[in-house]
Image (tube, rainbow, N blue to C red):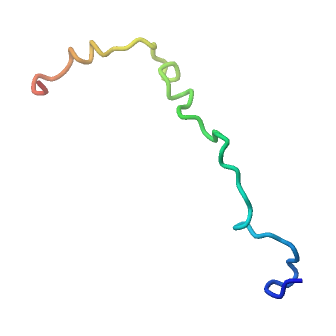
Amino acid sequence: MSTENPGTQGARGDDDRTVDLSDDFVVLPEQTSDDTDHGWGERSSGNDDWLLAQRPPHWD
């Protein structure tokens, strides 16, 4: 019987507990489905050429 904490015979504290962190458990995805082109109602094709053509002249 322990004299330090009476009533906690053989009980182990959280500091003594081992936790296995080797598993890659995903709580939240990196990107939600509504944060995609389809979620915004857009086509998946890129518009980089159009954006470059619309650059203001003072950016050059």
User: Where residue 44 sits: x, y (%)?
Assistant: 45, 14
In this rendering, the answer to whether 58 lies above or below 27 is above
Please identify the quarter of the rendering in which residue 4 is found.
bottom right
Height in image: 43 above or below 9?
above
Which residue does the image show at 66% across and 45% down from the upper left?
22
Number of marks present in the image shown? 0
Residue 3 is situated, as x and y percent measured from the top left of the image, at 83, 88
Comparing 30 with 36, the one in front is: 30
Quadrant of the rendered image containing residue 14? bottom right
Q: Quadrant of the C terminus?
A: top left
Q: Quadrant of the N terminus?
A: bottom right
| Residue at 19% in and 21% down | 55
Q: Is residue 21 above or below residue 40?
A: below
48 shown above or below 10 = above
- Horizontally, residue 50 falls left or right of residue 60, namely right
Q: Nearer the viewer, residue 19 or 29?
A: 19
Q: Is residue 51 left or right of residue 15?
A: left
Residue closest to the eye, 39 or 48: 48
- The residue at the point 70 percent across, 50 percent down is 20
| Percent x, y of residue 33 | 57, 27
Of residues 59 and 17, which is closer to you in this image? 17
Taking the spot 27% from the left edge, 13% from the top edge, the residue there is 50
